[in-house]
Every structure is written in C-alpha cells, then in structure tokens.
Image: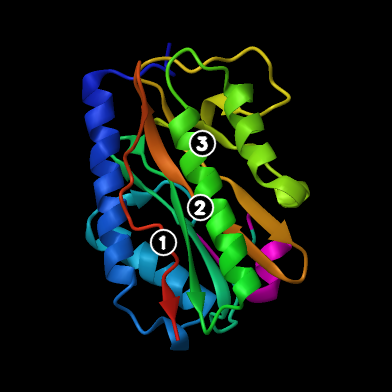
C-alpha cells in the first residue's frame, strides 16, 4: 500500500522535486569548467543545507572516462570534463525526490552527441510508455530494446519507486514479471549507458503514474547542455 501515494504525499514529493530543479538551475550558473567533482557535490549539499533540508542520498557527481566505470561512484578531486553525471535529490517533510542530468564540459564529438540523444529518446520513451496497468517489465524492455546495440551498456534496472525511501517498490526491470504500475505510484525513469574507461550518461526523472499517463515531476531541461 505504501507504493500508492495519497494526494498529500504526492504534493510533498512535488515540492521536493521543485526544490531539486531550483538547485540544478543554480548549479548551471556556476563556473563548472573550473570545478572538481567534489566541489560540485559539495555545492549541491550546501544548497540543500541552506534550505534547511537533507539530501535523499549522497549526491553523485562523476565525469570523464571514469563515469562509465561505476553506477554509483565516489566523487574525486578531478576537474569536471566530458560528460558529467549529476544525480541528487532532497527530502521534504520525509518525502524524497531523485533526478539525474548529464551535462558536457568541452566540445562533444558527433558520436557523443548521438549517444546522449539516444539516452534522451529512451528516457522520453519510458515516460510515454508508462501508465496505470502497464507491466513494469514491459516498460524496461521497451526502453532497453530502443538502445539497440548499446543496450549491453545499460547495466541497471530502468527505475524504482520513490517515497519516504529513495528506493521503494515497484522495480522496473525486464526480469521481474509480476509488478504492474498503478495510479498514484511515484517512480523513476532512468536509462543510462556506461562504457568502461570511455563515458557514462544517465537521464532520470521522478514521475507520477496516472490512469492515462506518466507525468515527470522533475522539470529541469534535458537537452544536452554544453559548457565550452
């Protein structure tokens, strides 16, 4: 029953998502080309702290070639470069948000832009395909297959429930046949690819399931943002 959220609970999650978007907007105004992963992570933590809130989890900031090596890496003292995965959320009155955006520092190659747009299209496809009554496994499968030859680099489930815990049911994964999406569930849609020693890309929204649709509650822009 905890997977089905009340109107009040949904409003708290929406508030958490709005704060997450506001922090991301402020983040984009920083001199990211001269920041390290740790500095950007700490900037996010500071923005959460001054709002007298707590993070949903320790923010993930990783970039460059090593961004493809782990799903949940530790931030380092390396200067941000190439694709930068930024994954964070906040807790508002016990309810959480979860959002990932990937930006680019430098000038992306044609292949890099293609891969980013591939993940963006797959994330949007996951949102479009999701609604009450649809099997969670089906959503994961549709998104996974849309990645074509790159699906082997998608090494985690498509999404999970969000509430008072950052990982709740249901889990959106092609190997789990039973769960179905239900009205007023709050889930993440978060496809990604991780090519070892080359790059990592992930795009994630916290979403509300309705009878007719899946509505992204995190609203930050998803087109590729480039800092040259």
Q: Which residue is mark 3?
A: 126
Q: Using the image, determine if residue 185 lies above or below residue 69.
A: above
Query: Crowdedness of circle 2 by 10 Å Cα count: few (<14), some, many (20+)?
Result: many
Image position, residue 102 (x, y; %) = 50, 63
Q: Position of residue 126 (x, y in %)?
A: 51, 36
Q: CA distance from mark 1 to mark 3?
A: 16 Å
| Secondary structure of residue under mark 3 | helix
- 97 left or right, relative to 169: left
- What distance separates the C-alpha of mark 3 from that of mark 2? 10 Å
Q: Identify the residue position indicated by label 2 in the image.
A: 120
When the figure is inspected, residue 103 is found, relative to residue 148, above or below; the finding is below
Q: Is residue 184 magenta?
A: no
Q: Earlier in the sequence, mark 1 or mark 2?
A: 2
- The range drawn in magenta is 60-72
Picture quadrant where residue 122 is located: top right
Label 1 close to label 3 by CB (< 8 Å): no
The answer to whether residue 215 of the structure is visible from this angle is yes
In space, the residues marked 1 and 2 are separated at their CA atoms by 8 Å
Label 2 element class: helix
* Left or right of 129 on screen, residue 54: left
Q: Nearer the viewer, residue 141 or 98?
A: 141
Q: Residue at x 49, y 29 (%)?
A: 129
Question: For the residue carrying disc 3, how many other residues have a C-alpha within 10 Å: few (<14), some (14-19), or many (20+)?
Answer: many
Q: Is residue 113 above or below residue 7?
A: below
Residue 6 placed where, x, y %?
A: 28, 18
Residues under numbered marks 1 and 2 in contact, where contact means CB atoms less than 8 Å apart = yes
In depth, the one of 41 and 198 nearer the eye is 198
| Residue 67 falls within the magenta-colored stretch | yes
The quadrant in which the N terminus is found is: top left
């Amino acid at each position: 029953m905890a997977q089905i959220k009340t109107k009040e609970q949904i409003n708290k999650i929406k508030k958490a998502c709005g704060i997450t978007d506001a922090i991301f907007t402020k983040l984009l105004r920083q001199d990211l080309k001269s920041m390290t992963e740790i500095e950007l992570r700490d900037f996010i933590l500071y923005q959460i702290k001054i709002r007298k809130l707590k993070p949903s989890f320790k923010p993930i900031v990783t970039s460059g070639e090593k961004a493809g090596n782990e799903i949940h890496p530790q931030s380092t003292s390396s200067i941000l470069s190439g694709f930068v995965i930024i994954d964070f959320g906040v807790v508002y009155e016990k309810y959480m948000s979860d959002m990932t955006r990937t930006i680019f520092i430098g000038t992306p190659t044609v292949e890099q832009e293609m891969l980013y747009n591939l993940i963006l299209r797959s994330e949007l496809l996951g949102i479009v395909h999701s609604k009450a009554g649809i099997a969670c496994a089906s959503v994961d499968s549709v998104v996974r297959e849309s990645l074509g030859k790159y699906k082997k680099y998608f090494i985690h489930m498509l999404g999970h429930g969000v509430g008072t815990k950052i990982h709740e049911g249901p889990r959106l994964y092609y190997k789990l046949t039973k769960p179905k999406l239900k009205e007023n569930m709050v889930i993440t849609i978060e496809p990604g690819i991780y090519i070892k020693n080359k790059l990592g890309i992930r795009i994630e929204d916290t979403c509300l399931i309705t009878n007719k649709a899946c509505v992204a509650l995190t609203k930050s822009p998803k087109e590729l943002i480039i800092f040259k």
